[in-house]
Image (cartoon, rainbow, N blue to C red):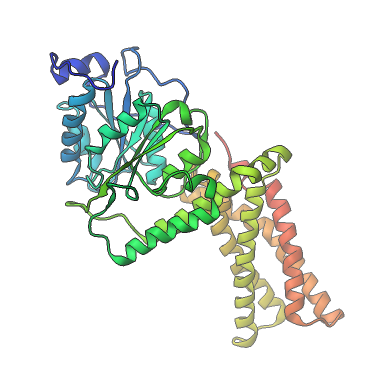
Amino acid sequence: MPLFSTDFTHPRSAIWNMKTNSSNSLLAVSTGPLKISELPPNSVGTGDESIHLSLVIPTYKERENIKNVVNVLSQLLDESIAGNYELIVVDDDSPDRTWEIAQSLTTEYPQLRVMRRQQERGLSSAVIRGWQAATGSVLGVIDGDLQHPPEILIQLLRSIEQGADLAVASRHIEGGGVSSWSVVRRFLSRGAQLLGLVILPGVLGRVSDPMSGYFMVRRSAIAGATLNPVGYKILLEVIGRGKVDQVAEVGYVFCERKEGESKVTWKQYIDYIHHLVRLRLSTGKVGRLSRKVKFPIGRFVRFGFVGFSGVFVDLTVFHLLRTVIHLGLTRSTILSAGVAIVNNFLWNDVWTFSDISQGQRALHQRFKRFLKFSAVCLAGVILQALIINFLYNVLEINQYLAKLIAIAVATIWNFWVNLKLSWRVTDVK
């Protein structure tokens, strides 16, 4: 079917009854790896061929916006590719019940499908879960607050039709911009882009606006790739892990929201840096080396960074216990190491082993992981206490130098045993 259709002889509902199930039941949420299938799933209940465009709208607390968004997008796409698209709202179980409002619209807009996620959180993973349920050969994403001007969709579609694997709406080319951002937000946005170019030039250098959340990509360009996003910047994953040859960009002006609240927080910038580092370690030469030698180099480096942070936590607490509270050497060693263990577990759980822990977020599951991690580290604490006492009391080495040596030995022990035992048994289907 051509991209732009001028056949309006059928009303919207008649067209869509041929393509989708107009039931207002919620879409099932996929589990397992964040991977897009090569062949689109059949249209619900029909077995017909796939449609052209699947546009995902990730939402969280967008009750005031969702009806207008669906209406505007439906009118726009009905004029260009009527009957050959679907809108997929993926809501992260909003407390304002955005998903419920969206679900109520499905009788009026048969092209609308709704997914309610209750076990996972995060914009990037929401987009991928939506794509996993999509039937389109072209996959897209747009914000649920109309900060992304809908009319740009037609230009993105045209770019795909003309051969692009990826069409990105950009604020940083001719015709693009931001409406009323503060100087601080502009500085942070540009600074984040510059940092990305330093860490991951091969990915961020391909587009002018790598932090854009408004784009379309051919299914074939990302099919089969296991995506592993952090935070909001799904475009980084698409470029970094997909088979994207030709890229097109369309300028757009980012608009301020009229309803609802902004989701921009400092955590997003931290997640962005985390995402860059993860991609750097899992793609390119480092990633190829890791796959070749079958050793988790990226995980090892992350574990090392976490351990390095634990050194500072350990030494700081050790110093306070010895000089402020005046505890004995052994008790200070054990207590400071215990605080460091908690620090290291939390960072390892949300970073080093996040691919496993994200699928098991329940409190009791996290507690079990902590117990296993602590058991491994407990042996390291005992080893550390024996070493520091030997070095300080027998060899009369400076207590801080003795502490550093003991930490180094215990760190090697902890990594090796955790590599073989910790988190491994929790990675179940």
Q: Describe residue 287's horizontal placement relative to residue 216 as left or right.
A: right
What x and y, as percent, mark residue 153? 27, 35
Q: Nearer the viewer, residue 339 or 237?
A: 237
Q: Residue furthest front?
A: 174
> In this image, 346 relative to 141: left or right?
right
**Could you say where residue 426 lies in the image, as x and y percent from the top left?**
58, 42
Q: Quadrant of the N terminus?
A: top left
Of the pair 168 and 33, the residue shown nearer to us: 168
299 or 214, which lies in front? 214
Residue 12, compared with residue 192, is above or below; it is above
Using the rendered image of the protein, determine whether residue 36 is visible from the camera's viewpoint: no
Q: Give me the residue at 59% from left, 87% from top.
A: 324
Residue drawn at point x = 35 percent, y = 18 percent: 50
The reply, left or right, for residue 40 in relation to residue 54 is: right
Figure check: 143 above or below 429: below
The answer to whether residue 308 is visible is: yes
Residue 272 appears at what percent x and percent y? 45, 54
Judge by depth and name the residue closer to the eye, 234 or 205: 205
Residue 427 position within the rendered picture, expressed as x and y whole percent measured from the top left: 58, 40
Q: Is residue 94 above or below residue 140?
A: below
Would residue 17 appear left or right of 354 to someone viewing this image?
Answer: left
Q: Quadrant of the C terminus?
A: top right
